[in-house]
Amino acid sequence: MGARHSPLNVLFIISDQHKRSVAGCYGNALASTPNIDRLARSGTVFDNAYCPSPLCGPSRAAVMTGTHCHTCGDFTHQQLDPVRELPTLGSVFRDAGYSTAAFGKVHIIGESQQRDLGFDERALRIFTDRWRQYRDRIGEENVYRYASYSRNDKTQHRDYYNSANVPVDLPDAMMYDNLVTDLSIDFLRRRAGSPWFLWMGLEKPHPEWYAPPDFHDMFSPADMPLPETLRDELPDVPRTLLNLGRPAADLSDNEVRGALAAYYANIAYLDWNVGRALDALERLGLAENTVVVYTTDHGEHLFEHGLLQKHCFFEAAVSVPLLISSPGRVPSSQRRGNLVSLIDLFPTLLDLAGISHTPGLEGRSLLDSLAGAPDPDDVAVFSEFYSWGAPERMIRTPAYKYVHTEGDISQLYDVLADPLELRNLASDPSLASLCQCLDSRLMDGWELPPPGYRSSVNP
């Protein structure tokens, strides 16, 4: 993959709730993602990447530590105990002599003034600090205009999914992702002469699905195709999945189309900010010596199976976009079908930067996959979820997806023959030995959360 240029900068862009299929580089002609597509041309796209958990905080903690959620100890948003003291992307790169920064959403329980997760500079946290830093920047009433659910008074909340497809009532300069990108560009300018690691935590397209007017103007609800499984049944699934409810049941087809248009507008707004960061790299002469990662913390159902949000292991919720670009180190305009997990990014970035691996990493480096090597025969990726009262874990192999739910039925899907995941095969007697084998692999080393952990979940 070419000679190593050292030291190598790292721009780690992580959005929130980006459905993998809503991007041009993943075959969606309706989506407007010219900048993410630009990364696809300059780097490598992974078609089978999965998140460590279909929930923001646990997934992000796993990415940050390169370990599974049960290993780093981040189970739910409501837990009282912080994540375990493990090396982080920030701490390892800082120890290697890098300037480090994390702007925007990180959402890891236990980050504090005393525990900086390895980042020299930090700003604009939301969720983990109850919106305080964003509120201090733009004012409380403006924060409510950005995200009405940040109010305690639920009577003033607006349509969470914006089925009317109307723009946000907030100046562009006060938009959260705009401010995060501004901070990131300023950091690049100030640190252009020394090696750096930058975590750029964008919040879109997490709901509420309201973006500036120009982005809503790009999409007409009438052009939005309805998901094939919009009104399907959900037989043979565990109670945890049924607890999600079926939001589509309360909406007309036209309202669903409006919400779809609003989501696409938020994706376009996200992409615009990605482009601003990529333009800054070029303008500052940093692009040739920087590895850029774009991914998200988990997916979004976007009305598949009548569902919204994440919180389970259907493909739309647990699969994620993943692009890696670095001139001379990562092949350009390539696609890889390897099964990968976001916890693989930690060792991959260390290898690209020539930094020794820290002990305890549970992901595998993707350097061989980037070079075109096939997966080993026993490849599998895992994901976990703990927030609806029953611990759950998924294993995904090249042919199957299997989900174990404590105290409830299991799920088995033939992902090749049944990509829409309509038929749970776990009760098929002819597949009993397969289920037993997958369950054994899935349970090996799985650490359940401590007794009394809080399992309710927020949006």
Image: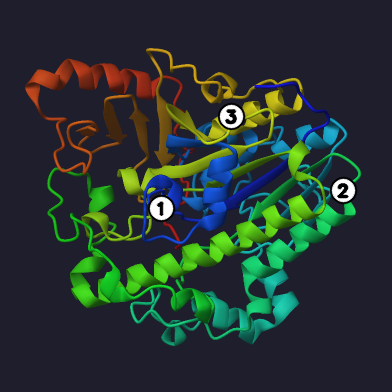
Are the residues tagged 3 and 2 within 8 Å (C-beta)?
A: no
Cα distance in 3D space between marks 3 and 2: 24 Å
Circle number at residue 396: none
**Which residue is under mark 2?**
192
Query: Residue at horizontal 35%, vertical 29%?
Result: 395
- Circle 3 packing at 10 Å, graded few (<14), some (14-19), many (20+), is many
The type of residue carrying mark 2 is Ala
Q: Is residue 124 visible?
A: no
Left or right, residue 379 beside residue 178: left
Cα distance in 3D space between marks 3 and 1: 24 Å
Q: Is residue 266 visible?
A: yes
**Which residue is under mark 1?**
19
Query: Residue at horizontal 44%, vertical 17%?
Result: 374
Cα distance in 3D space between marks 2 and 1: 33 Å
Q: Earlier in the sequence, mark 2 or mark 1?
A: 1
The type of residue carrying mark 1 is Lys
Position in image of residue 81 (x %, y %): 61, 46
| Residue farthest along the left direction in this orientation | 429
Query: Residue at horizontal 41%, vertical 46%?
Result: 26
Left or right, residue 372 beside residue 243: right
Q: Earlier in the sequence, mark 3 or mark 1?
A: 1
**Which residue is under mark 3?**
331
